[in-house]
Every structure is written in structure tokens, then in C-alpha cells.
Image (tube, grey):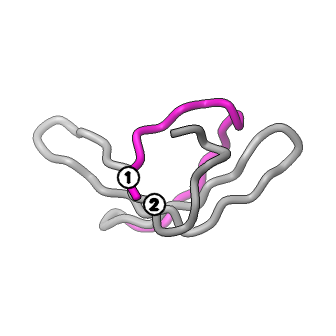
Amino acid sequence: MKIQELQPGDLITEQRLDHTVAFEVIAIRQIGRRFMVTFNSALGMTSAHYHGDAYIAAAR
């Protein structure tokens, strides 16, 4: 899914060495051509900046 298509509530998973971490999209905000996405997981909250045409593995 393209970053610009993400919506709050979408889930992203990331495989770490021996386990999988699930991240929930909390907020997404456009800043120029880029998007700031705020995620929540068991590890806490974090934000990341992406180009709008970038892809990420997400589930709705």
C-alpha cells in the first residue's frame, strides 16, 4: 500500500530477528511531498517520514 493511502487504524508488521512487531497507524499528516506517520506498538509510539509514493506492507 502506498504511504499516502494509509489511514488511522491500519496495521503494519515488521519481522525482527525472532519475532514480529505490529504497528498501528495512529495519525498521518502530509508535509510538502512527504508524509509523517505516527505509529503505536508494544514498543511505544514513534513517528517516521516517508515519500508519498513509497510502499509499506499494511493491512486494513
Image point 32% across, 48% down: which residue? 13
Magenta stretch: give its range. 44-60
Where's residue 53, x and y in %? 67, 31
Closer to the camera, 24 or 48? 24
53 left or right, relative to 43? right
* Disc assigned to residue 10: 2
Q: Which residue is mark 1?
A: 59
Can you say whether 57 is above or below 23 in the image?
above
31 left or right, relative to 48? right
4 left or right, relative to 33? left
Can you say whether 54 is above or below 14 in the image?
above
Where's residue 42, x and y in %? 30, 67
Where's residue 60, x and y in %? 40, 59
The reply to whether the C-beta atoms of the residues labelled 2 and 1 are less than 8 Å apart is yes
Closer to the camera, 60 or 14? 60
Q: Magenta segment: does it hold 49?
A: yes
Marks 2 and 1 sit apart, C-alpha to C-alpha, by 6 Å
Image point 30% across, 56% down: which residue? 22
Image point 48% across, 66% down: which residue? 45
Instruction: Count how many numbered circles sit on residues in the image.
Output: 2
Question: Disc 2 marks which amino acid?
Answer: Asp
Q: Magenta segment: does it hold 54?
A: yes
From this viewpoint, which residue is outermost toward the left?
Answer: 18
Question: Disc 1 marks which amino acid?
Answer: Ala
Q: Earlier in the sequence, mark 2 or mark 1?
A: 2
Local SS, label 1? strand
The residue carrying pointer 2 sits among few (fewer than 14), some (14 to 19) or many (20 or more) residues within 10 Å by Cα, namely some
